[in-house]
Amino acid sequence: MLRSGGGGGGDDVIVDIDPSGDDGNLHLAAGGVELEDGSGVGGAGRTLSFAQAYKLRHRESQVFTLSQTLLLAFQSLGIVYGDLGTSPLYVFPSIVMPNADETVLLGVLSLIFWTLTLMSLVKYALIVLKADDHGEGGTFALYSLLRQHVNFKGNMPVPLTRLASDVNLKFHSKKKSRKSWLQKFLENSQRAQTVLTFIVLIGTCMLIGDGALTPAISVLSAVQGIQSRSARITQENVVLLSAVILVLLFLVQRFGTSKVSFSFSPIMLVWFASISGIGVYNIVTYYPPVLKAVSPHYIYYYFAKNKKLGWEQLGAVILCITGAEAMFADMGHFNKSSIQVAFSTVVFPSLILAYSGQTAYLIKNPGAMSTAFYSSIPGPLFWPMFVIATLAAIVASQSLISASFSIIRQSIALGCFPRTTVKHTSDKYEGQVYCPEINYFLMLVCVLITVGFQGGPEIGRAFGVAVIWVMLLTTMLMTVIMVVIWEVNHALVAGFLVLYLAIEGMYMSSLMNKVTQGGWVPFAITAFFLTITLSWTYGRKKKSEYEERNTVNEEEFAGIVARSARVPGICFFCTDLMNGVPPIVRHYAEHTRCLRQLLLFVTFRTLPVRSVLPSERFLVVREPAGVYRCIVQYGYMDRHDIVGDDFVRSAIDTLKEVADSAEEAKMMDLAPADGVSYVLGRTVLNMDKTHHWFKRIVINELYRFLQKNFRSNVSTLKIDHAKTLQVGMTYEISDKSSS
């Protein structure tokens, strides 16, 4: 039996929509939920009609000209490739290899070349970018894509509801007519669904950890160059200067990336041109045949000579692909072609030349490993490159900080993170947001990491752990997508999985050996955010379960309506329940003794799709006694804004479609003029001692703390506060069977 509230943390709801009615409208059978297998939940045989048949405003796929693609490719240099592009600052300095000779250095370069090629070029640029959710990328986009094709059931950590009509949405992927064996397995295994969801949550939390680690290692690596110019400049001075730059970087976030991002792409273009030119100069000057390292047999020589020490340095080599995940995460701002063009024509060649140049220099100057980047710069170019490197490091930091804000916003929209302040910093780009609480948390963590480790190699190890975990989890999700959605030949899927599990597993084994030496940091950040996420979703789930067990039945609700005075106007009663009348209505009616003439129960529902068109926004069901139910649908990238008359007018226009008579339609038209009010519930959960002590701590302490200290739904919904009434009620959770 599948039933849930919209975003309330329960199970999936599947409503069978029948478009074949004589009136041309969509019908909801049995006044409740009709499941795909034909079984129903609730209702007494009456038929409730949706407002109108779903008529989609289909839009043609946008076709980009060559000039548009090239322009987007140029812009992506500053937004997407800041982190990946600045990796030459810290890869070789992070390697600890005493007495490195030509064979060792060529082996390291070969490892870097093939890691960049296989992980960044083949995996991300050619494969992962194809798994977009109608132009959106990132971990949540992969999860959204899977949720559109796989019927998730059970008590999932991420609360999402599902209606059969969702497949008609413009931005909903169409299901395959034939289910693969893996899809059948996932749909029949609640444990597999839970594991898949946890993979997404862990990957998302690790990516937020990147938002704290990227600024620390990028800025530190750029600023450390000044030590080579004066012996009086100590590591403490470098750490202090880096901390100041980091604090300033986070403080200017409130102005939005749109105010400063116009300079990002030119900075990165100059950076890539500079490291390429210096790389060519070093190759020609120090060791012209260095590019022979493209032969993978040098990797064999490297391990044969260094054995365990060579394996331990893999944690530093993996830093060459830090930021590769941004190619997919930031795809919503661009398109696949522009990102691929920028990477293959500018980023990839520049990085190969930069690393080859550093290798050529180190072959002749092996003692300069710890300062490889700045030591390999010709003397007259040092200060210009110091300025360019510092600016590029700031750009690299900005991209991951902004990505963290976007992730938190998507998490809030999907109901798996408490409501924080989300400010839109651009009227032009919906995805550009700023979260003050997350910003200052990242600033605090970033400064603590910088000062605590004093710019030591521990930061690189922590960064490497975060990167490889995101890569590994992406591989797992991509394997599922290949089988379930793309229907790729199983031999090719197995080849993909084995190859990348082997590569990423090798790197991870090296990094996990350094957990006690800095590698614990991303796990600590992940545990912190995962605790918040799971506490919040568990609390929402218990709230939804309570409301479902204590809904006001039809007979009781009819009595409440009959006993209450009806006053002119319209009332939007906001609830998480998609079916049934929430118990807080009983509480509200007992204290006010009146109801508006037009009472509309509204559920704001976030779908696992990137966007919902305005024409797809409303679903309306007619209830008795002048009462209606409305589902307001948004995608995870849509802005929830119901301020002003547009929302009310759209709701009224949709309601008029189900009016029984002209008089009823006229009453609906006139209702807003007599007053508009919004009623929202403010519930407090209290779990008694019949439940396990750990569950009591989660609900009574953690969830209640999150409720009190994060924003309420009143403050997050864009509602006219002068027209808002908040009703408080305590939910006593005492039924053992509900646990």
Image: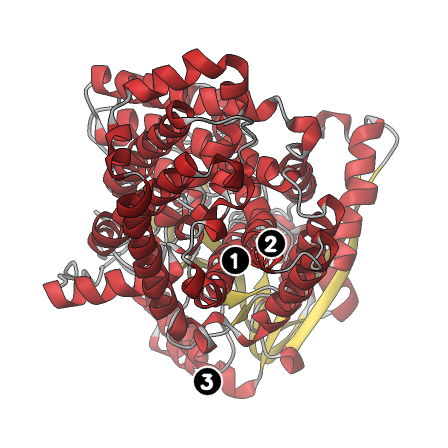
Q: Nearer the viewer, residue 595 or 428?
A: 428
Q: Of label 2 and label 3, which has the lower sequence position?
A: 2
Are the residues flagged by discs 1 and 3 in contact, CB closer than 8 Å? no
Residue 460 sits above or below residue 274 on the image: above
* Residue 149 at least partly seen: yes
Question: Which of labels 1 and 2 is toward the front?
Answer: 2
Q: The residue under label 1 is which amino acid type?
A: Ser
Query: Going 30% across and 43% down the picture, which residue do you hit?
Result: 352
Query: Going 61% across and 52% down the picture, which residue do you hit?
Result: 216
Q: Nearer the viewer, residue 294 or 438?
A: 294
Residue highlighted by disc 2: 220
Residue 669, quarter of the rendered image: bottom left
Question: Which of labels 2 and 3 is toward the front?
Answer: 2
In x, y percent, where is residue 332? 34, 57
In x, y percent, where is residue 53? 25, 57
Residue 600 sits above or below residue 328 on the image: below
Q: Of label 1 and label 2, which has the lower sequence position?
A: 2
Question: Which of labels 1 and 3 is toward the front?
Answer: 1
Residue 272 sits above or below residue 717 on the image: above
Describe the colour scheme in one phrase. Answer: secondary structure
Q: The residue under label 2 is which amino acid type?
A: Leu
| Residue 397 numbered tag | 1
Residue highlighted by disc 3: 670
Q: The residue under label 3 is which amino acid type?
A: Leu
Residue 650, quarter of the rendered image: bottom left
Tell me the element at label 2. Answer: helix
